[in-house]
Amino acid sequence: MARELTMNRIFSGVQPTGNLHLGNYLGAIRNWVQLQADYECIFCVVDLHAITAWQEPKELTANTREVAAAMIAAGIDPKDNIICNQSQVSGHAELAWIFNCVARLGWLDRMTQFKEKAGKDKERASVGLYAYPNLMAADILVYKSTHVPVGEDQKQHLELVRDIAQKFNHDYGVEYFPIVEPLIFGAATRVMSLRDGTSKMSKSDASDASRIAMTDNSDAIAHKIRKAKTDPEPLPSGSMGLKERPEAANLVGIYAALAGIDVEAVLREFGGQGFGAFKTALAELAVAQLGPIQDEMRRLMAAPDEIDAVLRSGAELAREIAQPILREIHDIIGVLHP
């Protein structure tokens, strides 16, 4: 039998596609640090998702280690949580195939992220990119996770996970998979580009000035914040004044998230001031908050054997959870297994 849950179980993952940035940290990794005391946590470097687009093999290896290093450096304790990479736990791919046979084409056709990533020539997109949501469902349900931290842009995928779980349960007349609940956080869950406040901060943006990379040094962080796009008006005294001011709203949201306060508190302190003084304060805060994390990341990246040992150990623990669940799924669907 699968190991019983002693508490609610979280699964969450980050793709190892390079240029890990402030948005990944504030929108995901920092929140995971806060969750680890209250949940049984599985944090995954989802390398199988990464290869839905071409990855240089050596870069994929390095990027996988970078994401793991960021998790550890940010404060996720590998002694109390599982940190693994997806490809070391074969149950992810096995359950994804089963879910390929449960999910409906119409469900996948509605996925907006596929339309965005495939563009106009979707006939040339990989089958993996199209079926990506089924693998995401398997990532979560192979551990019978109960909660998933998600950004606003991932809510549609989580709804599909719930649909797949419900259809599996209905088709086989069981109440096996939990109906996963989202965990959506507050300030700066969606960090925007420093060059365009209407676009999400992204590792794929051609401009390096659009994002603060987790490998940037203090001078680079301060420079990018000083050069961040703003508007000519002073900061407002309340959040209603940020409407129709996306760049201002983004910088204020980043400050609030880094300082652990709400947007209104930021504006009480800086309302009426120009961006010169505010950007200076934001740069100092960002350097102070990110510097120790970046130092530890650099130390870990220089010790790849240490990272690999964490990932191997995490994968062993992940398999201990996943394998009994897969055996139960085999019994439910009627396939023979050892």
Image: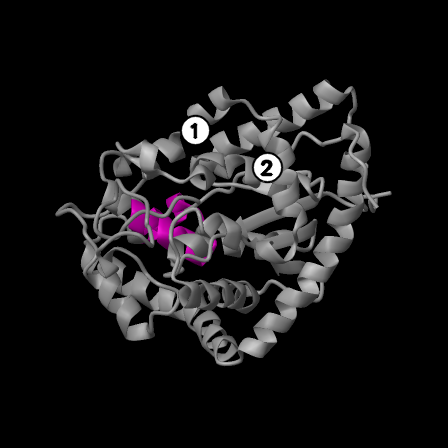
Give the residue number, with chain letter if any, for mark 1. Answer: 111
Of 294 and 4, which appears nearest the observer?
Answer: 4
Q: Label 2 neighbourhood size at 10 Å, few (<14), some (14-19), many (20+)?
A: many
Above or below, 200 against 16 in this view is above
The answer to which quarter of the image holds residue 141 is top right
> What x and y, as percent, mark residue 57?
43, 64
Residue flagged by tag 1: what amino acid is it? Answer: Met
Gap in Å between the C-alphas at discs 2 and 1? 13 Å
* Main secondary structure along the magenta-highlighted residues: helix
Residue range (magenta): 250-269
Instruction: Give the residue furthest to the left.
Output: 232
Q: Three-letter amino acid code at disc 2?
A: Ala
Question: Is 254 in the magenta?
Answer: yes
Image disc number at residue 152: none
Q: Position of residue 125 (x, y in %)?
A: 36, 38
Q: Is residue 219 above or below residue 258?
A: below
Quick check: 308 above or below 89?
Answer: below
Q: Secondary structure at mark 1?
A: loop
The residue indicated by pointer 2 is 137
Q: Nearer the viewer, residue 193 or 16?
A: 16
